[in-house]
Image (cartoon, rainbow, N blue to C red):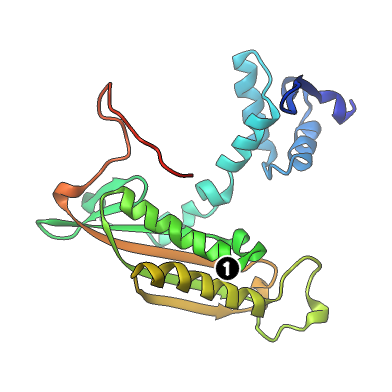
Amino acid sequence: MQLDSLFKKIRADIETYEVDLRSCSDKELLEISNRMELALALPEMKRIKEYFSKQGRNPTDIELQALGQAWSEHCCYKSSKVPLKKYVFNVDESRIIAREDAGVMEFDKDHYYCVALESHNHPSAIEPYGGAATGVGGIVRDVLCMGAQPIAYIDPLFFGPLDYPLEKLPKGVKHPRYLFKGVVDGIRDYGNRIGIPTLAGQVYFHEGYTGNCLVNVGCVGIMEKKELIHSWAKAPGNVYIYVGG
């Protein structure tokens, strides 16, 4: 079957397509994932196909793009959360108060502390200043959303060698020296400008990070226990105001 025949345009004002997932073979499911740059493996595509088959309809291309983003490593840490949970986050469960926009832990009898971690690897590899700055902004937002006051940053960073030969640089990859300066400037300009110090970090250089730098940022906040805000609706009739994007 020609792949184009699986896409049926369903709106004229916005170019939207119904994707005939229900009739796809395994090979075609993978071809659709690759063509749409969903980065979803065959088991994931088959799960989507199964869901929409039960719904009695096919997904739109917009729905598939939304699933591709929601199931990405960046959004749900689908491959890294298993080793992270096993080797890094082996904490006393009784001290965990919340796992929402950020993690909230018991500090003392009157206070909680709040921690948010985020990676902005690919955005920083494309535009290092903006990618790193918005990574910092995201974790500040997450800590604030829980009702805490941000007090400190951490930033473990991983790049290719700063003296990496230009002639060896893969096509489309920016030089580590350019990425390094942009990332450091982005973290500095967002974090320091709002008065939150970077208290700890790490910088590591290795050829393996030339193609995609790792930009990890973390924020720690503190709050009185009475200030904790949960990110769910407690009762019918609650009013939520969403500002910004």
Foreground pick, 99 / 94 = 99
Do we see residue 78 in this rendering?
A: no
Q: Tag 1: Cα neighbours inside 10 Å, few (<14), some, or many (≥20)?
A: many
Query: Residue 164, image x and y in percent?
Result: 72, 83
Residue 171 can be seen, yes or no:
yes
Q: Secondary structure at mark 1?
A: helix
In this rendering, the answer to whether 174 lies above or below 11 is below
Which quarter of the rendered picture does the N terminus lie within?
top right
From the viewer's perspective, is residue 81 above or below residue 196?
above
Query: Dot 1 corresponds to which residue?
Result: 129
| Residue 86 occupies quadrant | bottom left
Residue type at the position of mark 1: Tyr
The residue sitting at 66% across, 62% down in the picture is: 126
From the top left corner, tell me how far across and down residue 42 is, in percent. 70, 37
Asked if residue 243 is positioned above or below residue 119 in the image, the reply reads: above
Report the front residue among 207 and 117: 117
Q: Position of residue 158 (x, y in %)?
A: 56, 73
Point out residue 127 in the picture as x, y percentages from the top left corner. Answer: 64, 64
- Residue at the (78%, 22%) spot, across then down: 9
The residue at 44%/59% (across/down) is 137
Furthest-bottom residue in this view: 163
156 sits left or right of 230 in the view: right
Residue drawn at the location 52% of the way across and 50% of the way down: 77
Q: Residue furthest left?
A: 109
Which sits in the foreground, 195 or 99? 195
Q: Residue furthest right?
A: 2
